[in-house]
């Protein structure tokens, strides 16, 4: 990595271990990474794709999303993305399911998903690169968009409340030019949280946790700048209402996933005071003049953000 003073160093457990810890998932706050070594898993073909469902099946899909979260540690080769859609005054759902083994995921059957009627289906044996391209093809350019996020303990009633609030807030928006509202729901299961402590761990407060988590990601696209305030308010309402419900039931988790957070959310404040103090100490050690805090444009900084 290149430090603020221009020097080039190798950051790992043996050399610069504190910097290595801080660099793992903490944005552009400490240094410029020019190369990294990683563990690779040989993979030729895998199984996966997308199924789409009509509105009447959304409650069932939400139930299955929760089941997938609780069953996931039993099938560590499986991952999923459940998305609720609102576009053209219509609600639908989609489940993106993958299995790194080149065969249908057992969870397709164990959770009952295989029995739910669908309108389209791309599940097949293919390459990981093709699955990624298929997701990219569904992301049109040229529209305004916003991402938000929240984290909660995985819970069936909460997942259904998220669905309810998403429908209420998008219905209240009314017809907007180019609007496609999505409520994306993923999870961090136990078998994902425990490996986060390897090689010194990282600053994320969820590392090593024992309970599966909901990662909710409202993601809206629309056409006109004149609709910005309406869309942002709908997302803020969704975030606030769900968080209040989760807190009332003891399900809220004080963690914002940086890659999904909006410019109005304070990511580092959710890392916990101990981790935040440690991150600031690393920044003072390797960037005493605050170059990366002040000179790199946008994104999340330890002391807030600079521009966007």
Image (spheres, grey):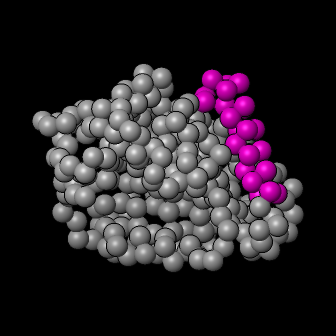
Question: Image quadrant of residue 151?
Answer: top right
Residue 291 visible at all: yes
Residue 273 screen position, x and y as percent = 48, 23
- Residue 163's place in the image compared with 182, above or below, is above
Residue 150 screen position, x and y as percent = 59, 41
**What residue appears at the point 53 percent right and 54 percent down from the top-left corner?**
298
**What residue appears at the point 62 percent right and 38 percent down from the top-left corner?**
156
Residue 51 vs residue 181: left or right?
Answer: left
Dominant SS of magenta comes to helix
Residue 189 screen position, x and y as percent = 42, 40
Question: Image quadrant of residue 43?
Answer: bottom left
Residue 125 vs residue 223: left or right?
Answer: left
Residue 303 screen position, x and y as percent = 52, 36
User: Bounds of the magenta span?
Assistant: 229-252
Q: Nearer the viewer, residue 72 or 236?
A: 236
**What residue appears at the point 60 percent right and 68 percent down from the top-left corner?**
52
Q: Nearer the viewer, residue 223 or 198?
A: 223
In the rendered image, the quadrant that contains the C terminus is: bottom right
Magenta-colored stretch includes residue 108? no
Residue 225 vs residue 31: left or right?
Answer: right
Question: Image quadrant of residue 123?
Answer: bottom left
**What residue appears at the point 63 percent right and 23 percent down from the top-left corner?**
250
């Amino acid at each position: 990595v290149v430090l603020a003073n221009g020097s080039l160093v190798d950051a790992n457990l043996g050399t610069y271990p504190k910097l290595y810890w801080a660099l793992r998932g903490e944005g552009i706050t400490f240094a410029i990474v020019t190369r990294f070594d990683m563990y690779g898993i040989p993979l030729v073909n895998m199984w996966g794709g997308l199924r789409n469902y009509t509105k009447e099946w959304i409650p069932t899909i939400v139930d299955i999303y929760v089941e997938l979260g609780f069953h996931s540690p039993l099938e560590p080769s499986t991952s999923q993305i459940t998305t609720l859609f609102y576009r053209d005054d219509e609600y639908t759902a989609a489940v993106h399911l993958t299995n790194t083994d080149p065969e249908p995921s057992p969870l397709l059957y164990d959770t009952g998903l295989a029995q739910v009627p669908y309108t389209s289906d791309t599940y097949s044996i293919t390459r990981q690169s093709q699955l990624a391209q298929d997701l990219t093809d569904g992301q049109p350019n040229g529209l305004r968009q916003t991402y938000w996020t929240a984290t909660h303990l995985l819970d069936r009633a909460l997942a259904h409340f998220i669905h309810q609030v998403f429908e209420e807030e998008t219905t209240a928006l009314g017809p907007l030019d180019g609007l496609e509202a999505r409520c994306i729901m993923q999870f961090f299961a136990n078998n994902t949280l425990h490996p986060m402590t390897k090689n010194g761990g990282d600053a994320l407060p969820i590392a090593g946790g024992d309970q599966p988590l909901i990662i909710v990601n409202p993601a809206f696209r629309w056409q006109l700048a004149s609709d910005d305030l309406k869309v942002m308010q709908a997302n803020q309402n969704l975030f606030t209402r769900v968080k209040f419900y989760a807190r009332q039931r003891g399900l809220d988790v004080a963690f914002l996933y940086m890659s999904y957070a909006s410019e109005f959310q304070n990511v580092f404040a959710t890392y916990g005071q101990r981790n935040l103090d440690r991150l600031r100490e690393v920044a003072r050690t390797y960037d005493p003049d605050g170059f990366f805090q002040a000179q790199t444009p946008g994104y999340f900084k330890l002391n807030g953000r600079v521009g966007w």
